[in-house]
Image: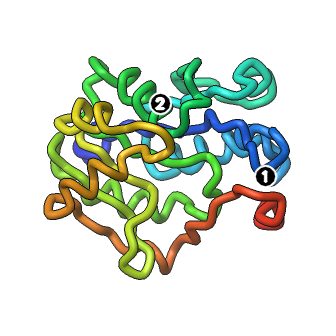
Amino acid sequence: MTDNERQVAGLVLAAGGGRRLGGRPKALLRHRGRPLVEHAVGVLRAAGCTRVHVVLGARAGAVRDEAELEGCVVVDNPGWEEGMGSSLRAGLDSLAGTGAGAALVSLVDQPGIGAAAVRRVVRAYEGDASLVCAAYDGVRGHPVLLGAAHWAGIAESATGDRGARAYLRAHEPSVTLVECGDVAEPYDIDTAADLGHLE
């Protein structure tokens, strides 16, 4: 791992309540015999992220009890029902002062995105002004690498379920797209029909 990669912290957004899944928190869905949040953390670790922060919200106590998150910084987001923007703000706030030059943001409900895609995005890191997104057939997706110089601006614009979308759109000329469509599938686990993607 290069010095650059050591500066990139992993950030898993795993606070959602699974409203369209009948109120089953996505972090606790089972994938390969374990909670989905464990899988997401494992992907970031396999890609070289030694510091991983995990933002929890819905049924956070149950997630802490059932998921093996040893070595992670677990961040509780009491405002998780406001949407992904609040979780992103909580996660970035938890990284302040850690020395991380960037946050590699992944979503707990995208198990089709593995370590190969994360590594590609991390390799595009060029310091704390970096903005890097995985792309799928040229369309921006996750994971997203957010340089620390942008965190304050992102936190200011992250509202509802938009996360960093508005900020990235406003800074589009500065965003590096890294094609990952050949190594990852960016589907979301949002509805009961999507559960077939889980193993």
Residue 194, given in percent of the width and then of the height, sits at: 77, 64
Mark 1 neighbour class, 10 Å CA radius: few under 14, some 14 to 19, many 20 or more: some
Question: Is the Cβ of the residue at disc 2 closer than 8 Å to that at disc 1?
Answer: no
Residue 22, given in percent of the width and then of the height, sits at: 84, 44
Quadrant of the image containing the C terminus: bottom right
Q: Is residue 126 above or below residue 94?
A: below
Q: Is residue 144 above or below residue 24?
A: below
The foreground one among 156 and 52 is 156
Numbered tag placed on residue 73 in the rendering: none
Q: Amino acid at mark 2?
A: Ser
Please name the residue shown 42% across and 81% down the image: 137
Numbered tag placed on residue 31 in the rendering: 1
Please name the residue shown 63% across and 24% down the image: 70
Say which label, 2 or 1, has the lower sequence index: 1
Please name the residue shown 65% across and 38% down the image: 16
Mark 2 neighbour class, 10 Å CA radius: few under 14, some 14 to 19, many 20 or more: many
Dot 1 falls on a residue whose secondary structure is strand
Q: Which residue is mark 2?
A: 86
Kindly tell me whether residue 199 is visible in this rendering.
Answer: no
Please name the residue shown 17% across and 36% down the image: 149
Q: Amino acid at mark 1?
A: His
Residue 57, given in percent of the width and then of the height, sits at: 64, 26
Kindly tell me whether residue 76 is visible in this rendering.
Answer: yes
